[in-house]
Amino acid sequence: MKKRKSPAQALAKTTPRFDTQKRELWVGHTLVKKFLQPAAAQETIVQAFQELDWQDIIDDPLPRVDAVNPKHRLHDAIQNLNRNQRGHVLHFFGDGSGKRVGWELRATPELQQ
């Protein structure tokens, strides 16, 4: 008979984590994304989620840049976070205000183990 996981074990398996040294984004044993090139906006977002224990939605953590629309910058960063993921386990999204970003897990075979 298969042993049941405690709620804490289940949460730890499905909560993303970002390894800042290796620049890798993980969910459980699944490597979701490895940043091989500089990606300051994307990394700032995942670092903010990491620091806030992966709350469902957070305020835009990106610093303001002169002559760049902050809503467009956040939108572009979210699109880039969703690109080139291995396994497409995570989905990042804006809340429609252009001021907040969230994440959700996608049901995949890797997470159903």
Image: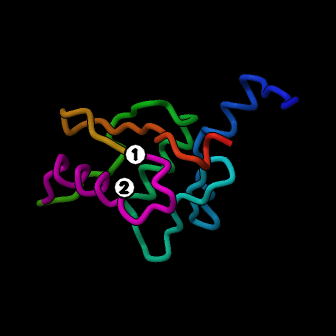
Looking at the image, which residue is at 20% across and 39% down?
Answer: 98
Q: Which residues are magenta?
A: 68-91
Instruction: Tell me whether circle 1 and circle 2 mark residues in contact (CB < 8 Å).
Output: yes
Question: SS for tag 1?
Answer: strand
View extreme (bottom): residue: 37
Vertical comparison of 69 with 38: above or below? above
Q: How dense is the environment of label 1, judged by Cα within 10 Å: few (below 14), some, or many (20 and up)?
A: some
Magenta span includes 11: no
Mark number displayed over residue 81: none
Q: How dense is the environment of label 2, judged by Cα within 10 Å: few (below 14), some, or many (20 and up)?
A: some
Looking at the image, which residue is at 36% across and 55% down?
Answer: 82
Q: Position of residue 94 (x, y in %)?
A: 27, 39
Residue at the disc numbered 2: 82
Q: Is residue 97 left or right of residue 88?
A: left
Residue at the disc numbered 1: 91
Quadrant in which the C terminus is drawn: top right
Quarter of the figure with residue 56? top left
Question: SS for tag 2?
Answer: helix
Question: Which of these two is toward me, 79 or 46?
Answer: 79
Looking at the image, which residue is at 69% across and 36% down?
Answer: 12
Question: Which of these two is toward me, 57 or 105?
Answer: 105
Vertical comparison of 57 with 18: above or below? above
